[in-house]
Image (cartoon, rainbow, N blue to C red):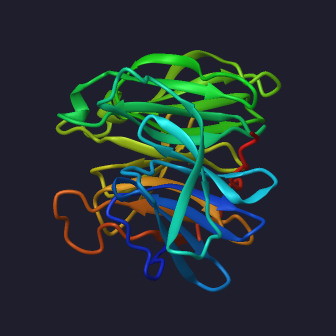
């Protein structure tokens, strides 16, 4: 099988994260996490538009809001805020706070978050200072319109990749510090998750040095795609067996997240980081074609 990896033009982000494909706008949204940057790659124009969120330090995820084309839910510190952005301007503004988590843990921040197939929020926190790979101060939450954040899991190291398979009734979650992918039973009608079970252990692949799993997505066949932060690789994995079906090599080391997109949802977009002075093309967003797989578009957040 031959796949092709190409750089998305002018897509650099020092800590690219949170890719989300928006069908209506045929655009890939992603963040530059440590500079409060939000980006939109317009597929038809083959062009990236970028904005800085006024007055903020972090932008850890970006989720379009349902029926509000210029509103986005963005993780800023421990707050999930609503940001107004036209998708073109260089500045975006926070209009209100949707909810806050762990308000007493000022050294924590939100990390990865996504919407489930019904438009509910799922995401979690991590330590924002010190050795982040040896702290377990984070939590994983769900939230839905009209409610309060609900803690699903405590003692989380780095709350990271999230994916849902409606057919298999599974929710997949990564705590980077545990080097594992968990599968939960998932009830789509209520959003409840239960019975976590390890389905993929990255320590077994490279026991001599830790592979840090980061972002994740799922294809229409039910396979998961796991980004490795220091592995230069995206693993395509059968979650039922834990078997690696394909290792997708990316020409930089710090792979942060993945999302299917494009007009036919058959392009795998891969965000990367340039932490600690990596050589080029670190921080570039890539597109992988020829995978003979399709995924699901991002779901807008219902607020």
Relative to the observer, which residue lies in front, 167 or 155?
155
Q: Is residue 39 left or right of residue 42?
A: left
Q: Is residue 99 left or right of residue 294?
A: left
Residue 86, relative to residue 43: is it above or below?
Answer: above
Q: Report if residue 158 is visible in the image.
A: yes
Q: Residue at x 46, y 82 (%)?
A: 9
Q: Report if residue 240 is visible in the image.
A: no
- Where in the figure is residue 239, as x and y percent of width and height? 57, 35
Relative to the observer, which residue lies in front, 115 or 221?
115
Q: Residue at x 35, y 59 (%)?
A: 35
Residue 286, relative to residue 271: is it above or below?
Answer: below
Q: Residue at x 18, y 34 (%)?
A: 131
Residue 37, relative to residue 129: is it above or below?
Answer: below
Outermost residue, bottom side: 45
Question: Which quadrant would residue 141 be assigned to in this image?
Answer: top right
Relative to the observer, which residue lies in front, 299 or 68?
68
- Where in the figure is residue 292, as x and y percent of width and height? 65, 65
Q: Is residue 276 left or right of residue 14?
A: left
Q: Locate the C terminus and report the quarter of the image it occupies.
A: top right
């Amino acid at each position: 099988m031959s796949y092709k990896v190409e750089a998305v033009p002018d897509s650099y982000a020092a800590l690219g994260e949170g890719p989300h494909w928006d069908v209506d706008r045929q655009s890939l949204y992603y963040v530059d996490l440590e500079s409060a940057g939000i980006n939109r790659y317009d597929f038809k124009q083959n062009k990236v538009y970028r904005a800085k969120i006024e007055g903020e330090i972090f932008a850890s995820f970006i989720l379009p809001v349902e029926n509000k084309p210029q509103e986005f839910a963005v993780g800023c510190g421990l707050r999930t805020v609503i940001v107004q952005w036209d998708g073109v301007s260089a500045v975006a503004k926070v209009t209100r706070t949707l909810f806050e988590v762990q308000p007493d843990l000022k050294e924590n921040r939100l990390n990865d978050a996504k919407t489930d197939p019904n438009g509910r929020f799922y995401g979690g926190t991590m330590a924002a200072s010190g050795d982040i790979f040896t702290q377990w101060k984070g939590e994983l939450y769900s939230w839905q319109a009209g409610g309060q954040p609900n803690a699903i899991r405590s003692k989380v190291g780095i709350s990271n990749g999230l994916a849902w398979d409606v057919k298999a009734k599974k929710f997949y979650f990564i705590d980077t510090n545990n080097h594992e992918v968990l599968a939960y039973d998932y009830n789509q009608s209520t959003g409840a998750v239960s019975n976590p079970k390890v389905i993929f252990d990255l320590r077994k692949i490279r026991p001599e040095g830790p592979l840090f799993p980061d972002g994740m997505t799922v294809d229409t066949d039910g396979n998961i795609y796991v980004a490795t932060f220091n592995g230069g690789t995206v693993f395509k994995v059968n979650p039922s067996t834990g078997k690696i079906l394909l290792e997708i090599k990316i020409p930089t080391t710090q792979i942060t997240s993945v999302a299917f997109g494009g007009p036919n949802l058959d392009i795998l977009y891969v965000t990367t980081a340039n932490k600690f002075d990596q050589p080029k093309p670190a921080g570039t967003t890539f597109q992988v074609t020829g995978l003979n797989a399709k995924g699901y578009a991002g779901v807008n957040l219902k607020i």
